[in-house]
Image (cartoon, rainbow, N blue to C red):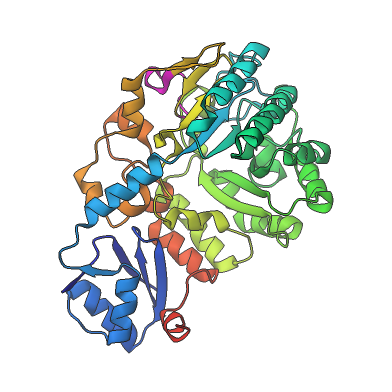
Amino acid sequence: MLKASKFNKMFWDDNELIIYNSLRGKIYKTAHNELSKEIERTLYQQENCCNDTVMRFLKDNGFLINDNEDELTTANSQKLDVQFDKLLHLIIMPTEQCNFRCQYCYEDFKLGKMSKEKQDAILLFLQKNIKNYTAVSLDWFGGEPLLAIDAIKYISEKAMKICKIAKKTFVSSITTNGYYLDLKTFEMLSNYNLVDLQVTIDGLKNTHDSQRVLINGEPTFDRIISNLLEIKKYARTKFCKIYVRTNVTWDIFQNFSELIDYYYKLFGEDNRFVFYFRPVTNLGGNAIKNISEKLMSYKDFSQIYKILKSDKRLNIGLYDRAFTPGGSICQASLRNLFIIRSDGRINKCSDYLEWPENQIGYLTDNGNMIIDNQLLSKWICSPTNQTCINCSYYGSCFNIGCPAKKIRELSKTCGYEKIFQEETLSLLNAYGRIPEIAEVINNG
């Protein structure tokens, strides 16, 4: 006997039925026809309304499972595989200073550049422990990490050599405001197996230059755009993805269609550039008070998806990831992810940096991580909410979409793609990223 998976999601997107299974990461669609009616009755009413070929398709893709299968056990096993993989992910803050003073920033900029001793300590830790991991990922964060470009070069070159000797894969990424990301700097970073970088552009020139300014208040938009256009034109690498994030306020929303036109005109034909959008939220600090009246509610922000859906021009490849198994978990819940701050403190979350619960240890100068395992366990072993276990999206987020909020607030939290699940799936469908069931079956 077969039964419908508890991790199925079904809804109508105009005249097409979308079916999604979070545990398998499978998404398909079918037009409003006899097939869609049969699938709906089969998955909703637990009746065998489909022919053998369609039933086999639904079973092979996890929408139907054996009646005695315990899906929660399978899901939790998969959750452990994701959380306890053997990739060492170090997010390094080579400086906590920044040349920007963004209107919503939560950081306090009290710490400066990482000392040479702490840089060497990272390398000593890597040398001592590389045997325990299958690969190493260095992610540069800040502050503005490019203010400490010498530290990035020094650590990256030596870390690559350590990994090469140990025959382990090495990759890197960076989150930067883009002000110092000229072509020369980008190509230098690319030498260290740069797989992705993130730059934030907050709307068109007027809105960006009101939200993201230099310390002295001068604008930054033109410099960032110039840098990205230079990279687009001259950079040789084809493998690095450049994620352009836009933090949306009401001001930016007013000109959102014009912003899409602008992005497409400049970068739309280069698939290395990927665009995604987030609402500005309050992550603490005093700066957010400057624009509190411009913050959007989630309900209002959902209109962004409708505009993107009607436009269909930008590369929105990042949104797919949220519908893969474990694709919506927070990286802070990964056992082998550590944020190494410029003074050697070790955090799990890149937000809420000064929370006591977020400071799980420190890195000694001789390359040892001294970890408070009780604090660490709060991030990777937080209790699962019963409501989440019964949610169809559980296979994507495993109830660890934001462990920080669970720790601090003892409440259930959901990620953006869960909150806007139907809107995002509908967006992917509009962009032609969801296969048609009949075509898949016919192509065998």
Task: State which quadrant residue 55 falls in.
Answer: bottom left
* Residue ID at (27%, 54%): 74
Q: Position of residue 76 (x, y in %)?
A: 28, 47
The quarter of the picture where the C terminus appears is bottom left
Q: Position of residue 231 (x, y in %)?
A: 79, 47
Q: Position of residue 43 (x, y in %)?
A: 24, 73
- In this rendering, the answer to whether 323 lies above or below 188 is below
- Number of on-image labels: 0
**Which residue occupies the foreground of this view, 45 or 366?**
366
Q: Is residue 202 magenta?
A: no
Report whether 293 appears left or right of 421: right
**Which residue occupies the foreground of this view, 17 or 320?**
320
- In this rendering, the answer to whether 118 lies above or below 3 is above
Report whether 182 appears left or right of 406: right
Q: Is residue 359 magenta?
A: yes
* Residue ID at (51%, 31%): 131
Task: State which quadrant residue 325 falls in.
Answer: bottom left
* Residue ID at (55%, 18%): 108
The quarter of the picture where the N terminus appears is bottom left
Q: Position of residue 265 (x, y in %)?
A: 74, 60
What's the magenta region?
349-360
**Which residue occupies the foreground of this view, 419 or 257?**
419
